[in-house]
Every structure is written in structure tokens, then in C-alpha cells.
Image (cartoon, helix red, strand yellow):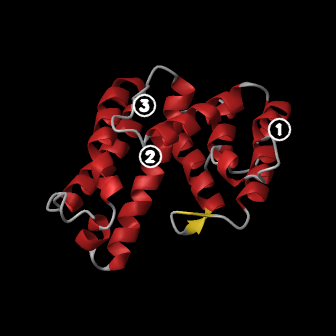
Amino acid sequence: MTVLSPPRTAVIDRALRDARAWCAGHTIDDRPALVHAVRVAVTIGEHVPAPRPEVIVAALLHDAPDLSPAALDVYQVLTTRYGPEVPRIIAALQAEHGALDEPDPPIRVDDQPVLLASTADKIVALTSLLRRARASGDVAGYFGRRPVLCRLLPHFRAFHQAAHPRVPASMSVHLDTVLARLEQATAGITQTDAR
């Protein structure tokens, strides 16, 4: 049983339908975008007992601003369909993603719904990276061709340390385990290699 197993609340059913529509034809981490969205929502449910529906809905739709048609005012649609909390969480996640391009991305852990969705998103995305690296047959080469990721690993570790006391212990352990595997896989990669 997951947070998405029937019977679901009507709002989660609606979000799943919207996620299917907006994710159609898109990929994230070399898989259908819907797979990523579902995994983020399910990961929250694995670690948070009885998560608020708004957090699960935001997890399902967190990539909607990137995937929905350009002519659509996605935040207005989200507000109309789900109320103000869901688009607020999604906007915060979008801002966090955008900040990863900055030299020293800020770390915010003061907003619990955003923190839960952000932590789950990192767990899913980083786990997927590890899976793809192993499947490539050349783990060092795979990460060596991803200098941005290698540069961001200390940021993700700092995020984990800041989030640790604020998320469920099992979620913190899950992120720590994924980060430790990534750190081990990239330990021999120098900045010269990572180009």
C-alpha cells in the first residue's frame, strides 16, 4: 500500500489525472515524467505517516510549471483546482531547482511541506542517477561527464545536515544512504575529470 493506492481522496485522484496529462510525452531521469512524480509522492508516504493531501498533490505536480503547455497559467490553474497551498509548495520547489545554478545555492528548511517534498525529490532523483550510472557500465565515466552534479554534492550533503532534525528519521537515513553512495561513486573523480 502506498499513498497513491486506492481508495484515494478525490483531490489526490484529480492530481494524479493532472499529472498524467501534464507529464505525457515528457521524460525525467530517462523515464516517463509521471514515474518520477509518482515516486516522489510515494517516497513521502513511505516516511511520513498520514501526510497532508496538499503535500502529496504538490509532489505529484511539482514539475507542472516545466511540463504544462507554455500558454497555460499553471499557477492560476493549480490555485483554482487545489487552493493556494499546492502552488505555494510547487513555486518554492521551482525556486529551489532554479537556485541550483547559483554558485552557492541557499538551503531552506523552515517550511515543512516544502522540505518534505524537496527531500523526497532529492531521494528519487539521486537514486535514479545512481541506477543510470550503474546501468552505463562505467560509473566513474558517467559521473565524470556530469560536473554540475559533482559540484552540487556538497550542497546536497549540507541540505541533508540542515534537514536531518526536521524530517522523519527514516527519510533522513534514506537521503544519507543515497548521498553516501554517490559520494563513494564520485570519490575518485577530480574536477579535471568532471568535464
In screen coordinates, is 89 left or right of 156?
A: right
Q: If you read the primary sequence from the N terminus, does the residue marked by circle 2 or circle 1 appear first?
A: 1
Quick one: label 1, few (<14), some, or many (20+) residues within 10 Å?
few
Query: Gap in Å between the C-alphas at discs 3 and 1?
Result: 31 Å
Residue type at the position of mark 1: Val
Report if residue 65 is visible in the image. yes
Q: Which mark is residue 168?
A: 3
Give the residue at the far bottom of this rendering: 137
Q: If you read the primary sequence from the N terminus, does the residue marked by circle 3 or circle 1 appear first?
A: 1
Q: Quadrant of residue 143?
A: bottom left
Circle 1 sits on which residue? Answer: 77
Q: Is residue 159 above or below residue 15?
A: above
Q: Which mark is residue 178?
A: none
Viewer-side label of 2, 1: 1
Q: Quadrant of the C terminus?
A: bottom left
Q: Secondary structure at mark 2?
A: helix
Residue type at the position of mark 2: Lys
Quick one: label 2, few (<14), some, or many (20+) residues within 10 Å?
some
Query: Gap in Å between the C-alphas at discs 2 and 1?
Result: 26 Å
Question: Picture coordinates of residue 131 (x, y %)?
Answer: 39, 67
Circle 2 sits on which residue? Answer: 122
State if disc 3 and disc 2 touch (CB < 8 Å): no
186 or 48, which is in the foreground? 186
